Image (cartoon, rainbow, N blue to C red):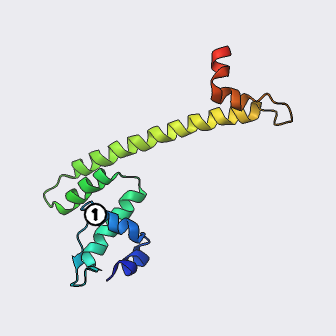
Amino acid sequence: MNIGDVSARLGLPAKTIRYYEEIGLIKPLRSTNGYRSFVASDVHRLAFLGRARALGFSIDDCRTLMALYHDESRASADVKDLAKDHLGKIEAKIRDLQMMHATLSELVQSCAGDNRPDCPILSDLSGLSAAIG
């Protein structure tokens, strides 16, 4: 299977597939003319990577997950620990986004949005409201 076929089948851009090869996450065969040739195991690895990346795992985490997947003597606790760590990062991002949402909602609410030049949003962004208040 060529890179275009794999890209279409998995919904991964060819550029991403080439990047995964460049950083050593996959190693497709090369034909004599230099074209990549993907076998079923390559497609499976790429699907695995695509799903892991869609869940927000970093490239390093993907490397670790891939190694754990192929290690039949792995402890599921190792996989769970990695996933729990990632989940904690996601939860922290959610808290940060909720705080950003609350702050921005308050600023939008406090802005008259009329023709006057004073604007609490710009004041907050400039740091003047914290310095004055």
Q: In the picture provided, is 107 more to the left or to the right than 94?
A: right
Q: In the picture provided, is 119 more to the left or to the right than 36?
A: right
Measuring from the top left, give residue 102's x and y in whole percent. 63, 34
Q: Which of the 4 image quarters holds residue 116?
A: top right
Looking at this view, name the residue that lies furthest to the right. 115
Question: Which residue is located at x 79 percent, y 27 percent?
Answer: 118
Q: Which of the 4 image quarters holds residue 66?
A: bottom left
Measuring from the top left, give residue 75's x and y in whole percent. 18, 52
Looking at the picture, does residue 10 appear above or below residue 84? below
Q: Quadrant of the N terminus?
A: bottom left
Question: Which residue is located at x 38 percent, y 58 percent?
Answer: 53
Q: Which of the 4 image quarters holds residue 108?
A: top right
Q: Quadrant of the C terminus?
A: top right
Question: Which residue is located at x 63 percent, y 32 percent?
Answer: 103
- Residue that carries the numbered disc 1 in the rendered image: 22
Q: Is residue 22 visible?
A: yes
Looking at the picture, does residue 51 appear above or below residue 60? below
The three-letter amino acid code for the residue at tag 1 is: Glu
